[in-house]
Amino acid sequence: MAYRKVDEEILQQVRGIISDDKRILTEKQDLIGYSYDASFGVFLPELVIQPTTAQEVAAVVKLAYEETIPVYPRGQSTSLSGGPLPVEGGIVLDLSHMNKKLEVVPDDLIAIVSPGVLTADIHAAAEQAGLIYPPDPSSSHVSTIGGNLAENSGGPRGLKYGVTKDYVLGLEVVTPQGEIIRTGGRTVKNVTGYDLTKLIVGSEGTLGIITEAILRLIPKPQATAALMAIFDDIVTSGEAISKVLTSGILPAKMEIMDQTCIRAVESYQPSGLPVDAEAIILIEVDGHARAVEEEIREAAKLCEAVGARSVKIATSESERANLWKARKMVSPAITRVKPTKISEDATVPRSQIPAMFARLKKIREKYNVNLVVFGHAGDGNLHPNIVADKRDKDEMKRVEQAVAEIFEAAIELGGTLSGEHGIGNMKAPFMEMELGKAGLEMMQRIKESWDPKNIMNPGKIFPKPGQRLNLTEG
Amino acid sequence: MAYRKVDEEILQQVRGIISDDKRILTEKQDLIGYSYDASFGVFLPELVIQPTTAQEVAAVVKLAYEETIPVYPRGQSTSLSGGPLPVEGGIVLDLSHMNKKLEVVPDDLIAIVSPGVLTADIHAAAEQAGLIYPPDPSSSHVSTIGGNLAENSGGPRGLKYGVTKDYVLGLEVVTPQGEIIRTGGRTVKNVTGYDLTKLIVGSEGTLGIITEAILRLIPKPQATAALMAIFDDIVTSGEAISKVLTSGILPAKMEIMDQTCIRAVESYQPSGLPVDAEAIILIEVDGHARAVEEEIREAAKLCEAVGARSVKIATSESERANLWKARKMVSPAITRVKPTKISEDATVPRSQIPAMFARLKKIREKYNVNLVVFGHAGDGNLHPNIVADKRDKDEMKRVEQAVAEIFEAAIELGGTLSGEHGIGNMKAPFMEMELGKAGLEMMQRIKESWDPKNIMNPGKIFPKPGQRLNLTEG
């Protein structure tokens, strides 16, 4: 597909759509800020528009469709998979300015939100009504709900509460041809035709642009309790996870950090973590106060019975915050080691977590890379992170091979390429490995039927012919 | 689309695919049993095949695609929306014989099942492992999981636990062109490309035939408690529902029966229900034993505070079963009144339940129909049922108008045509009213891209040009 470049004629038309010239960015210094996200690679857009209404989005998309110009929706660009990168040039739609609506309707247990609203603001608004919006991607204080929706973001609470998709009842969407449609609605049950809501959530902006969402809220759990368990053997920690999950307890969070991770955190900010331990597990339960108290004690007993070196239950809110501090320091700790971080989210059936750890250990040794593993153990969603220096081409070649082997391992163990970050451009070459030719083709048919000119976030999810992972260029 | 008829040449080819002739039915007396479901209308298929493997299904579908013959997947035919009806003739695939696999994997909290397995058998197998499969359509003892998946069945537990779709991690599917694909997998988190799993679940057999499913299980709640609250005023009962749901309690079930319903049950089998009451609400909570005990008392207090005439908490397992008896008798009770039952599932935002009851009351009077209302109050999923006699053409005309007005009311109140029964053939004419032209077209594009010859369960979901609701013929 040959795309048209953004020229003066296009700009004139855009000025007719967007009343305020300040929301049309064409200067290179402005465009640079839109050329990257939290993943790898830099791609300069030709034009950035900051729409504030669905009508503006629809008019721009209609123009882009008529003229065959790529369009990339973008929130706060915290994507770890390249979701908003303008890999084919064209127009970036910065939706972070479309942030006016955040309406909680307690009687219907819903919130109606604009795509540019920060997810943390939705959390706060729901709590004020005695409710919660459960999805909690680690980026929630800086990422927009629009980005969370496009990528179907997860987070630690996925184990008990599910992911973003599980809390979306309805959407307003601008289609690739610039029509405004509504999907779903305000009700939890809705089987009227195909579930376009759940198709669009997680489609990484390739099927349309979300301009409003109706989110499902639930009553706020009354109490929370947490524990930290330390294991000499990572296989034992895997057994503890299984034991807890089959005991009748469904924790809100169940996180794991491997030894490399523990050491990185401890050397970043010493806080008494056991650097000789092979794994730390953090468990949090929530719900009714009495239930929570009993469940956390039961979980501690189960960890001890399996062979944990030690288990510590937080006895106050500040102790609980303290337990989680180590987990929260992982990201800053590991990026201090080297400047380039490749953050993966390969996910395996939870019984395969010990096997996946063994595979990751081998990969670390085989390719001599700085591989750190942590993640959401309860749902099998691990985060193998490799830190490197992208100026070191030789190291990056090894990283490339290690990343490919991580994907292979996940799929061989019955898992998936991506649990919560999305495919973006980097993982696209591996799609057929997981889905097979026919499976990938059925996805492509949907894309082509909705976006025959491939203008909507091109270069994401679907590999180009012969496309391979490349971390040494771009 | 002109479909080819099943002739001797086609039959020869089918005999080459299905080894056992007994699983190929061509005699009229056999075909009649496949001409109806639990909804309205009778359509005779030309051929019935009982496949037992995905390979057989794929080969039959490939043949049907090549020869342009309609194919209809069918489970136990409990559909209330006409899902399995062979409205264009052609081949019915009876999947109830494909029922060999029911494997629970406790460590991964999943079950892997064949489509012909009864949903109740999955419930039982999960419970043996200390787990539950939460979706509980009222038909679960007689309906297959394949049918539940095709229709995305709900049930009373939808309020707390969601619907069938929320518990499907992966599928094996035969596409309309006879390819076998796998979607999703064994992990709760999976964002690898488009969510074909959630697109296919609830697509009513129009996008492919499910030949295996991986279901998510959760730990079994330790305890359950229930109450019955009686209200003189249906609006007050609506307030009680809201009060409970915003108090921090998330009941497992929250059912309502209106006065017509109470009277029907009481005249069917007298059990002391108050026939002068305007509404009965049944609430069930589950979870940790202590939490449950406290929550049911709190819910009772809230009902009383709002103005319930009386509230009864079940103090034993048998008392709890007794409370639910009234709700379970609704279906047999109302079908005793007249032979033809039109069972709807219009769903509204839960704050609109009192308004919906008011609208239904008007519709009952305006068209002079036997309209009974019960349903899942907690999630706004009501079941307005009209009982009539299909031999009485004049009455059926009034029923037709009443049904159309029920749909209009639901949509005007911000709700949806169908909460859990599906669209099938009967509700197809109302699709555009809810979705708009563009919204319906985006669904149609998916259908056409997957099934260009429209052989896969044709006549469902999408209306034919000019199609109208017709209850007086067929």
Image: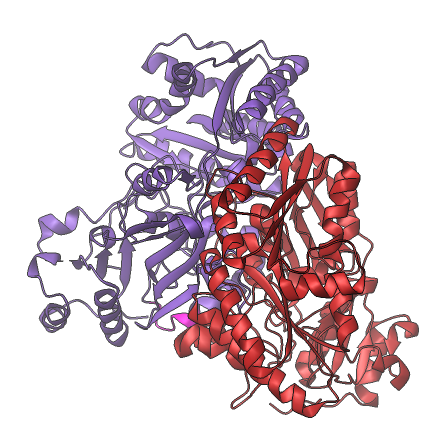
Chain colours: A red, B purple
User: In the rendering, at what x and y percent does residue A66 appear?
Assistant: 67, 82
Q: Is residue A4 visible?
A: yes
Taking B325 as reference, is A23 above or below it?
Answer: below
User: In the rendering, at what x and y percent does residue B330 appear?
Assistant: 38, 24
Hey, which quadrant is residue A434 in on the image? bottom left
> Residue at image x 68%, y 37%?
A224
User: In the rendering, at what x and y percent does residue B322 appear?
Assistant: 39, 16
Residue B42 forms part of the magenta stretch? no
> Residue at image x 45%, y 78%?
A433
Residue B451 forms part of the magenta stretch? yes
Taking A409 as reference, is A104 above or below it?
Answer: above
User: In the rendering, at what x and y percent does residue B344 appear?
Assistant: 43, 37
Taking B307 as reference, is A471 above or below it?
Answer: below
> What's drawn in magenta, residue-wise?
B448-454
> Residue at image x 62%, y 29%?
B249
Q: Is residue A269 left or right of residue B135?
A: right
Q: Is residue A366 left or right of residue A437?
A: right
The quadrant of the picture occupied by the N terminus of chain A is bottom right
Q: Is A307 or A418 nearer to us in this picture?
A: A307
Q: Is residue A92 left or right of residue B135?
A: right
Q: Is residue B25 visible?
A: no
